[in-house]
């Protein structure tokens, strides 16, 4: 059975400039597979600078990996040509963070939705075009009569973001890259947009890569999660396992910062204190070494990926008694 998309040992390195010898590893040895027959919602989580957006750009083919390969339906996405490339562009879509930047203020909503239909020749008549637009808007919870004919400034941020999702849905994508899709939307509208994404996965069989720093929304929408820190996977597995019982010290720090609605739950219950952390890095070892309260000398070496539970693994020497697994097998940890 052929995988829909596969990232195989992907590394992305950015250089500091033509005259500089320094470089930044934005993503390090990242491997993942997506199965077309098992569409799912997977969260990629981490703080700013963790490599989340770099991963999104790689998945969309906007940038090339420094090392490793990215395959779509068995073919390297950077070798695709002609109809195969057009199919990839149509089937792998994105919804970005800013719901305002996508719109040209001089055009109505109709223009944004009509252009992809014309570009990919998805309709044979104006009536069919209108039917597809109406169906897409309805699917994301909008009433076409309230949206069509209006200019961007006449719409709320939540409406604009759902229109962006509708635009992607028009193309019947196989994969949707949602990069911080609710971070610039009012809190009252976030639940609606998350519910829209969840419905797309269930009703249209779209696999969604949900990229966020907000673990609260990740917990409510995703089935699996990958936690990144400075380009490296710290922990991965089922969202229930990782968020309810985090194992890596970095994940524990992230989870402990969530304002859970529980008056009996104390914040800061772990022994990890941000103000006590020294920012630094051992390039050959664990990226979290200089900030970790449980660091050991061995952490100056690169820790392997240890399986802790059937659906949970962490890159940390605290678990060196556990079975070591290869990064390529990380997908086996992620429930569909």
Image: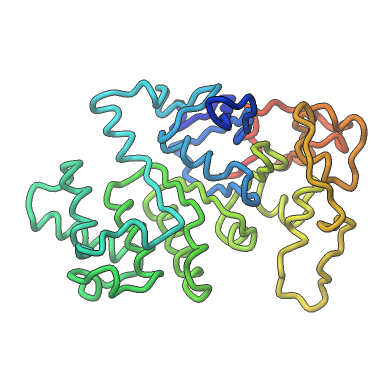
Locate residue 228: give its quadrant.
top right
Q: Give the residue drawn at x 36%, y 58%.
A: 101
Check the image and name the residue furthest to the front. Answer: 19
Q: Is residue 147 above or below residue 255?
A: below
Furthest residue in direction bottom, as rendered: 263
Provide residue 129's location: percent of width, then percent of height.
14, 55
**Residue in the foreground of this view, choosing between 24 and 39:** 24
Residue 87, image x, y percentages: 29, 34
Q: In screen coordinates, is 137 left or right of 40?
A: left
Residue 309 horizontal/vertical position (percent): 77, 41
Q: Nearer the viewer, residue 48 or 124?
A: 48
Where the C terminus falls, by quadrant? top right
Q: Residue at x 57, y 49 (%)?
A: 43
Write the residue at 57% across / 44% down: 52
Q: Position of residue 198 (x, y in %)?
A: 47, 58
Residue occupying the point 29% across, 55% down: 167
């Amino acid at each position: 059975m052929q995988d829909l998309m596969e990232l195989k040992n992907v590394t992305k390195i950015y250089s500091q400039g033509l005259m500089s010898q320094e470089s930044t590893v934005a993503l390090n040895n990242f491997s993942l597979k997506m199965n077309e027959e098992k569409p799912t919602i997977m969260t990629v989580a981490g703080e700013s600078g963790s490599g989340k957006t770099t991963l999104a750009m790689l998945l969309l083919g906007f940038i090339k990996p420094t090392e490793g390969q990215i395959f779509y339906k068995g073919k390297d996405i950077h070798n695709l040509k002609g109809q195969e490339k057009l199919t990839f562009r149509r089937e792998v879509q994105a919804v970005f963070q800013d719901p305002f930047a996508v719109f040209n203020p001089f055009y109505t909503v109709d223009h944004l939705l009509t252009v992809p239909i014309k570009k990919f020749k998805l309709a044979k008549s104006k009536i069919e075009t209108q039917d597809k637009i109406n169906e897409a808007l309805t699917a994301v919870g909008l009433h076409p009569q309230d949206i069509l004919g209006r200019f961007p400034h006449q719409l709320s941020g939540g409406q604009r973001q759902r229109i962006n999702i509708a635009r992607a849905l028009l193309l019947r994508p196989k994969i949707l890259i949602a990069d911080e899709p609710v971070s610039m939307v009012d809190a009252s509208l976030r639940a609606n947009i998350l519910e829209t994404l969840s419905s797309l996965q269930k009703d249209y069989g779209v696999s969604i890569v949900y990229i966020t720093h907000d673990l609260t929304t990740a917990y409510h929408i995703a089935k699996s999660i990958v936690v990144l820190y400075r380009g490296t996977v710290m922990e991965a597995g089922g969202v229930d396992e990782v968020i309810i019982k985090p194992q890596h010290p970095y994940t524990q720090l992230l989870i402990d910062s969530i304002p859970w609605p529980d008056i009996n739950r104390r914040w800061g219950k772990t022994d990890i204190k941000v103000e006590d952390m020294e920012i630094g890095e051992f390039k050959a070892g664990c990226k979290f070494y200089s900030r970790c309260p449980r660091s050991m000398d061995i952490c100056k070496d690169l820790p392997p990926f240890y399986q802790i539970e059937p659906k949970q693994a962490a890159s940390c020497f605290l678990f060196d008694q556990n079975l070591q697994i290869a990064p390529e097998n990380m997908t086996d940890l992620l429930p569909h």
